[in-house]
Structure formats: C-alpha cells, structure tokens
Amino acid sequence: MSDKNLKRIYMDHAAGTPLDPRVKDIMEPYLTEEFGNPGGLYREGRRAKDAIENARKTVAGVLNCATDEIVFTSGGTEGDVLALMGVAHAYMEKGRHIVSTNIEHHAVLSTLTALKKEEFEITLVDVEPNGIVDPKKIEAALRPDTILVSVMYANNEIGTIQPIAEIAKIVKKHGAIFHTDACQAAGYLPLDVQRLGVDLMVMNGTKMYGPKGSGALFVRKGVRIKPIFFGGAQEARRRAGTENVPAIVGFAKALKIASEERKKESARLCELRDYFIERLTKEIPRTILNGDARERLPNNVNVSILDIEGEATILYLDSHGIACSTGSACTSESLDPSHVILALGKPYEYAHASIRFSLGRETSKLDIDYVMEKLPEVVKILRKISPITVSENATGMSHPEAFAGENLLLNWVEQDNYRTIAGSAIAYGHTIISQSPIDVNIAKQMNILLTNMDLKDDRIIMDPLTGSMGYGIEYTYSVMERIRLTALNGDKMLSFLGVRISSNSSARGTP
C-alpha cells in the first residue's frame, strides 16, 4: 500500500518508541563481548552481575527507593501479572477482594479475570466521563477483605492522568496494597514512589526509548509477592530465569535519560499536543476529544472522528506515510470497540471511530501540519463511501436537505411513503432502503415502483424481512435465498443490494 520512498511520520509512541542511540551504545558491549552469565562465579559472570546491579542503582535513584525494591522483568505485561498474581496469592488468607477501574490495560483486566476464576472477587470502579476516577468511589468500593487496589497512573489509550497520590493515601488508610501501572507515565510524569505512595509500580522500556522486552517492577519493602514462574534464585527469588543483561542495562539508561529530560520534553510536547487537538476539532467536523483536555499525558491525542471507522482511517493514513493507532497496541488486531471509550459512557459509534495519535521526541509541528493536510482528505473520502443510516424519526428523514452530498441511507421506504422519500433521494443524492414483507413478489414490486420514478439502481437497497420476528429464521432466510437465486437467473428487478437493519436507531454501517 505504501511507497518505499514516501516520507514516514510515526505517531504511535504509546505503542512503542525507537531505541535511543545513547541506549543502544550502552547496550552494545553486552550483546557482543560482555556475554557472561550473571550467575557465573568467573570474571565474565561477575562483570555481567555488576552491570545488572549498577542498572538497579540507577533505577532506584530515579524512583527514590532502595535497590532491593527493584525487580527487573520483560516488560509491562509481566510486571502487572507478577504484581497482581503475586500479591493475590500471597495475601489470600487475609481476603480475596480486589478493586480496580474499568479503563485499565488488558494486562491488568485479563489478570483480574483469571483471578476471578480462582474465586477472588473483583470490583471495577467506573471512571468519570473525562476518564478520571473519583478517589471517593475507590474508597467506597473498599471492604474489610480488600487486599489489593490497582489504578493505572496514566491511561494508554486516552492519556488521562489519575490522582495516584490521593488514592494511595486512601488505600493505605484501609490497610490494602496499592499497585499502579506506570508504563505510559514513565518519561512524562514524576516517578518518586515515596511521594506517590504506591506499593507496586510497573514500567516498560519500549515506551520510553528503551529496548523491547525490558521493564521493572517496584515492590515496596514489606510487601510480599509470590513468583509466577519458577527456576533459579534470580531477582531475590521473585523472578526466576537468566537475566537479560543488555535489556536491563538499556532499560536503566533509557529511564535515566527520560527522567533527566522529562520537564523540557513534556513542555514541548504539551504545546504540540494542544496545537494538534485544536486543529483536529476545528478543522474536521464531528471530531470529539476523548479524555480530559488538561489532565492527560503530554504526548496523547485521542479523538473520535464520527461517521467513519477508526481502522479504515488508519489504513488510509498509512498509505500517506502516517502511522497511528486505534488504541492499545495489545489489542490492535481485535475488531472489538475500545473498552476505554465505552467506559466514558460514549456510544459504540464513538468507540469504533476513535484514533490515537501519540507524539514523540522526533515529532515536530511540521509533522502535525502534514497530518492535518492529509487527514481531512481521508475523512472526506471515507465519509463519502461510508453511509449514514437514519430512521423515520431522525433528522435525515424529515430534513434530507441537511445531509445533501452525504451518503445517506433513508430507512425505511414502504409503499405508503415511497413517492416522497424517493423524491428526496433523487433531489439530494441519497440512497434508500426499500422495505417489504417477507415476499419475493412484493419486494420486486417495490423496486419497480422506485425505478419507475427514475431512482437509479445503485440508490436502492432491499430489506425484504419486515415482520421476520413472527417467522422462523429458516423461512426468513429461505426468502432471501429465493431473491438471490431469482436475481442470478436474470431478474433485474431483484438484482439490488440487500441489507438487514437490526434497529430503528440512527447508525453508520456498510450494507
């Protein structure tokens, strides 16, 4: 689809970042000559072990914690699973109740689902329409048997920042353990665990210009976690397996750089983010910002461009050299709507139309200008080919002129209203859905009436299933099959597109 010579603009840094050259340089020796196993007693092993411990000191310095409170992992998912499973299994004698929110990363939500099968009770607190959880709702959800609370620092899809320090005080007062996923926050927000008050915090190297497959889990002294897999005694017996020395060294370097450059880079990105949001919402009609406008990550822009599918927009943008996403990288292959957008109380249309642009160190104002040069064109094309379906009570039926030029499906046309509606369709370039009872001949007669009014064939879509609720599904679909076979045998008055609309509400879809 894309031209190899086409300029590429990468705007999916929330999914993954390029490796910082400074990180690559410090990793390189451990990919070649410094190959010793950290568990070895010989010189090469000791040098590898020293590299790990120096990296641990670096990470502990950024987090303002002790070195023995750092556990190196393979990334965010492992860190979340180790934290949640580890605490749940270590404290199950105290209680089996866990509190979280309905916008957490799937690494957290899926782990909680697994724990539910082990007879843990899970309470998911709803966030507010702006994507921020009310600490009072967290407090209201706590019970005497609550052992763990998990609230992410910043959301991976809409970038909203949660009041972690305030929630931590509430959780501590109730004697529970507090876990936060800080994978998106690292590099943009303060990570001082003493000020935040968290007991467990997860980070991921690939979100902050470090190597893939790297991460760390902060475990406050005194908090017990049971390992999730077994073998050696690495990482104080909390994470078995030979340590990935290059990844650990690279992670520590990336975290240090991100921490040192955080304030300056965050300020720069905030300006670009706000500029981008302003242009998107002003220049593209029916574009809605998802998440709080201010309490959001400096690099996050998540909008719903209504009337089109987010996946289609992304594919078109990719053909123009622009990389972005619909949300979480871990669910990018799924066609399910964003659970985060739905959790804001927004309809499915908003969720399916959502797009996430996440800016990075190399993003410039010129890049945003290029996106805004191409995106309106893409939206115009997709809105033209993606029909809007409106019911008899919707504005499009009573005022079709308001949608002149749009690919509007007028839903439904019957024998008692076909003249008026067909006339509107002809005048304003709309398409109609021709509704008839489950009868081949009546469906054909409706099409004849419409074509006699000079409505073109490609502006008629058949819905011959009226009253289907009163018939068996076998009968309903046998009629559809008869229509199809009759059309294939050359009956032009039945050679039209067919559709089944499941409700009378306004919706967007492809017949």
Image (cartoon, rainbow, N blue to C red):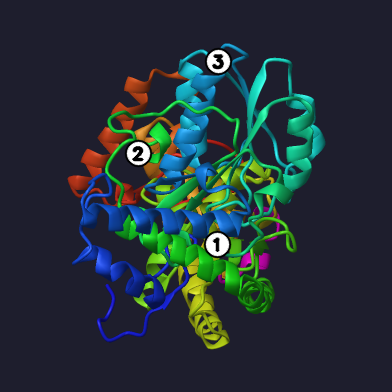
Viewer-closest of 83 and 420 = 83
Using the numbered discs, state the Cα–Cα distance from disc 2 to disc 1 in whole angstroms: 71 Å
Q: Any magenta on residue 153?
A: no
Under mark 3, the amino acid is Met
Residue 487 horizontal side relative to residue 417, left or right:
left
Q: Nearer the viewer, mark 2 or mark 3?
A: 2
According to the image, label 3 marks what residue?
92
Q: Which residues are magenta?
A: 397-405
Say above or below: 322 vs 337. below
Q: Are marks 2 and 1 in contact (CB under 8 Å)?
A: no
Q: Any magenta on residue 401?
A: yes
According to the image, label 1 marks what residue?
425
Under mark 2, the amino acid is Gln
According to the image, label 2 marks what residue?
234
Q: Can residue 452 be spotted in the picture? A: no
Quadrant showing the N terminus: bottom left
Q: Secondary structure at mark 2?
A: helix
Task: Give the residue displayed 50% in from the left and 28% down from the top.
Answer: 225
Q: Can residue 208 be spotted in the picture? A: yes
Mark 1 or mark 3: name the one nearer the start of the chain.
Answer: 3
Q: Place residue 485 in its image quadrant.
A: top left
Residue 508 horizontal side relative to residue 167, left or right:
left
